[in-house]
Amino acid sequence: MTPLVKLALVGLTATSLLNTPTSLATEQTPALVPSQWSYATDPYGSTATFRNQMITADGVWVNFKRIPRVDPKRNSWVEVIYSPEANSLADTKKISLTYKCDIPLLIKLSQSHYGKDGDKTYAHYQTKLPASSDWNTVEVNFDDFSRPDWTPKSSVDHGIVLNEITALYLTPSMTDKHGGEATLQVHAIELIR
C-alpha cells in the first residue's frame, strides 16, 4: 500500500469517526414526551431542583433533597412520575429504563388498589435498581417487583394488576429515617409489549 493510499484511508477513518454520533442510544431512542412526566415532593420541606426545566435534550434531570420523616403520621417523599399515553400498563411484558442515579433507584407501580383511590397505604409494588454514574439500561420483569417491608397488614395484596397501573414512580432510595439527596436522570423508558 502506498503512503498516499494509507494517508487517504486514515483521513476517511478520522472523518467517519468525527461524524459518528456520540451516543447511538440518543440517536435511536425517541425523545421523552414532556406531558408524560411530572414530579412530586411532600409538603413538609423536601425539594426538587432542575436545570432550567425537568426535561432537557438529554432527558429528565432532577436533584432531590428529601427531609427525614416528620412524625409517624407524616412521611416525606420525592418522586419522578411517568404516566404513559395509554391509561394503563395492560399488555406490558416488561419495562426498559435508561437512567443515572447517585443511589439505588426504586421503580414503583402506581396501582389503584393501594393509592388515594384504594386503601391509601401507598404500599405499591416496587423494585430496586443499582446506583449508576453512567447511563445504565435495564429491562425489568414484573416478577422482579414486590411490596415493601413496611406494608401494613390491613393492606390486601391484590397482586400486580396491569389494568390498574396508571403510572410509574421513580424514586431515589432515600430512607424515611435519614432523608438525603440524590440526582436522578432518565434518558429513555419503554413499555415492552
Image (tube, rainbow, N blue to C red):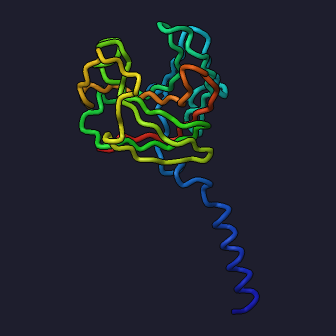
82 or 131, which lies in front? 131
Q: Is residue 168 above or below residue 44?
A: below
Q: Residue 123: give x, y in percent of width and height.
A: 37, 21
Q: Is residue 84 visible?
A: no
The residue depicted at 35 percent of the width and 33 percent of the height is: 146
Q: Is residue 119 left or right of residue 16?
A: left
Report which quarter residue 55 is drawn in: top right
Q: Is residue 154 above or below residue 165?
A: above
Q: Residue 136: give x, y in percent of width and height.
A: 53, 47
Q: Residue 190: give x, y in percent of width and height.
A: 40, 41
The residue depicted at 64 percent of the width and 22 percent of the height is: 49
Q: Residue furthest bottom?
A: 1
Report which quarter residue 101 is drawn in: top right
Q: Is residue 49 above or below residue 25?
A: above
Q: Is residue 148 visible?
A: yes
* Quadrant into which the N terminus falls: bottom right
The residue depicted at 69 percent of the width and 69 percent of the height is: 14
The residue depicted at 56 percent of the width and 9 percent of the height is: 70
Q: How many numbered marks does the figure carry?
A: 0
28 or 117, which lies in front? 117
Q: Residue 6: give x, y in percent of width and height.
A: 71, 84
Report which quarter residue 180 is drawn in: top right
* Quadrant into which the C terminus falls: top left
Q: Is residue 150 left or right of residue 142?
A: right
